[in-house]
Image (cartoon, rainbow, N blue to C red):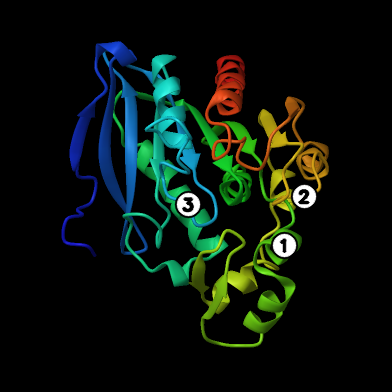
Amino acid sequence: MKDHIKHIVIISLVMWGLAQAQVSEIVVSFENEGQAVMGTLAVPNDATDYPLVLLLHGFTGTRDELPVLGTEEGMFSRSARVLAEQGYASLRIDFRGSGESDGEWADTTFGGQISDARAALDYIETLPDVDTARIGVIGLSQGGLVAASIADDPRVASLILWSPVANPPSTYATIVGTDVVQAALQTEGATTFMLPWGEETTLGRGFFDGLYAVDPIAEITAYSGPLFVIVGALDDTVAPQPYYGQIYVDYHSGESNLLVLEQGDHVFNVLSTGSELLDEVISASVSWFEETL
């Protein structure tokens, strides 16, 4: 375990100030399977008994998520600020092997991330001033797959999926290439390959086995709570849309669900045009939580 990490220890405190609605951010950690998972807890100041939203990042991401062009925030750090301004606490985590959490990226698996998300729910239950009957989850991309896979937990009161992976074999064949997937499934070691955005990465056999072991659409059938899915019409990563968003809604067993199609890409244009579309997505998500948490 990294020397600077201890179980449920506050590492630092950042005050956003009066100009940003008195939002406090605290870096925290909790343990899962003998390793530390790092997170950022954002809370509205001078409030108690507040709902909390768990934010789950995407493939190769970290807890602040992608930078938003023209700002000093990431997708999730911006989301956390807006949520807190509206009275919602949030916890955004680095899955093990990502960001500041323990573990190696090459050992990342869907099952490991799902386990981390469930451990995060356990940690949330220990937090003072949180109304644990009002826990929401937002998952982005691969984090959407993870979110769908923990939605059967009775502690999840409301679920929002942003550009969620619905068919892992198809989506990751698009991202990493069919030839890479086939080669990786024929080796017991790790596989190094180039991502579409020019970054080289290495993943172990467990990740590729997981493509065929995890079915988020099957998992969503076990969830009866409210479901909100937001996808981009121009998404060429989880494609075609809105088909993959609609399939979540079609297989969801609950009565309260909604699909919104935005005119944006997989990450709502944050890398190309900035915050405008993301802010619409965040606003719609807050409105959903106002109705369902």
Q: Of the numbered discs in the image, which one, if any, rests on residue 61?
A: 3
How far across and down, in percent of the image, does residue 179 sit? Answer: 72, 78
Could you classify mark 2 by the number of other residues whose Cα lies within 10 Å: few (under 14), some (14-19), or many (20 or more)? many
**Is label 3 in a helix, a strand or a loop?**
loop
Pointers 2 and 1 in contact (CB under 8 A)? Answer: yes
Q: Quadrant of residue 17?
A: top left
Q: Please report the residue visible at 45 percent of the width from the left and 22 percent of the height from the top.
A: 83
Which part of the image, by quadrant, shows the C terminus? top right
Separation of disc 2 and disc 1 at Cα? Answer: 9 Å
Q: Please report the residue visible at 37 percent of the width from the left and 63 percent of the height from the top.
A: 33
Tell me which label, 2 or 3, sits earlier in the chain: 3
Tell me which label, 2 or 1, sits earlier in the chain: 1
Q: Of the numbered discs in the image, which one, if any, rests on residue 174?
A: 1
How far across and down, in percent of the image, does residue 219 sit? Answer: 69, 50
Q: Please report the residue visible at 66 percent of the width from the left and 87 percent of the height from the top.
A: 186
Q: Please report the residue visible at 50 percent of the width from the left and 70 percent of the height from the top.
A: 201
